[in-house]
Image (cartoon, grey):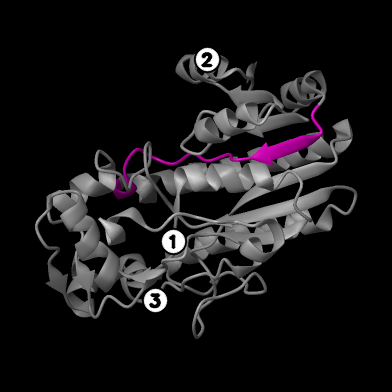
Amino acid sequence: MNVFVAGASGAIGRPLVAELVRRGHAVTGMTRSDAGAKALAELGATVARVSAFDAEGLEQALRASRAEVVIDELTALPKSPADMAEAAAGDRRLRLEGGGNLLAATRRCGARRYIQQASGFFLRPGIGLGDESEGMAVDASPRIAGSARAYAELEARLQAAGDIEGVALRYGFYYGPGTWYHTDGASADQVRRGEVPIIGDGEGVWSWIHIDDAAFATADALTAPPGIYHIVDDDPSPVSAWLPAFARFVGAPPPPHITVEQALAAASEDAVYYGTQLRGASNAKAKRIFGFRPRRLEWLTA
């Protein structure tokens, strides 16, 4: 199958391209950087050097790839979550405007399927784990609400494209090599410096996915029925459980505890939401439909 991957040199892009090539697909990886182009070529992919904001060049690259399936993994995330506030506007523009160019070009070029990166950790609040019928937390704290609205727009746009098979993959928080949540990642450094506290009772539930399992599931989505899927592992965990375990895993001291009032004074409403209000996601649909089998969250089993 001819597969075009946008965002191919990012955290999920590289393991995804490697897995697609391993499965025998003809892969074109889109990147703008020299390092990304070199890495993709070494993985066995054809390289498309084009910007998502160059609508004409993007369409030319898609036509040259003869893509049957287009995978949108476009992000503009910083190297550290500490810089996310400054990066948020650029990331949103790339996903919405750049991704809009990609979807429009995909439809014009006649590809049959579009796979969209979405979010499994900004679900609307509720009891228990949310399934795929749950919407996004568009009324959350300011920055989280902005992200939730962007993801909701991406999903709505894909569902409105009735002439193409749309698949939205709501990934959990990535962990593993090349991500923030790895022994050499930026979040591990923050935890070692004692910069990531448990806020209040730490009841915010985070859904996780190893970056390689995310890549495997995305490759499976080439043939799965169209729709929305939660690509998260079996261990949605409250901050009070996962953060101390992660600290031990990366050789950090136990995380500090602070009150909600202290967090609001020192950080923001968003920090409190992450720490106390996030809702976990259920992966039952992906397991049932295409046999998704993620690994256990590694620092809970270490």
Q: How far apart are marks 2 and 1 (CA)?
A: 38 Å
Q: On the rendered image, what quadrant is the C terminus found in? A: bottom left
Q: In which quarter of the image is residue 83?
A: top left
Horizontal relation, residue 254 to residue 291: left or right: left
At label 3, the amino acid type is Gln
- Image coords of residue 22 (percent x, y): 61, 28
Which mark is first along the chain, 1 or 2? 2
Residue that badge 2 annotates: 42
Examine the residues drawn in magenta and state their main secondary structure.
loop
Does any portion of residue 130 appear in the rendered image? yes
Which mark is first along the chain, 3 or 1? 1
At label 1, the amino acid type is Arg
- Image coords of residue 135 (percent x, y): 62, 72
Span shown in magenta: 67-82
Residue that badge 3 annotates: 277
269 or 195: nearer the eye? 195
- Image coords of residue 153 (percent x, y): 67, 58
Residue 273: in magenta span:
no
Horizontal relation, residue 218 to residue 56: left or right: left
Kindly identify which numbered label has been placed on residue 143: 1
Position above or below: 189 against 27? below
* Mark 1 burial class by Cα count in 10 Å: few <14, some 14-19, many 20+: some
Q: On the rendered image, what quadrant is the N terminus found in? A: top right
Position above or below: 128 against 65? below
Residue sitting at x 51%, y 83%: 126
At label 2, the amino acid type is Glu
Q: How far apart are marks 2 and 3 (CA)?
A: 42 Å
Horizontal relation, residue 45 to residue 240: left or right: right
Residue 77: in magenta span:
yes
SS class, disc 2 = helix
Position above or below: 131 against 121? below
SS class, disc 3 = loop
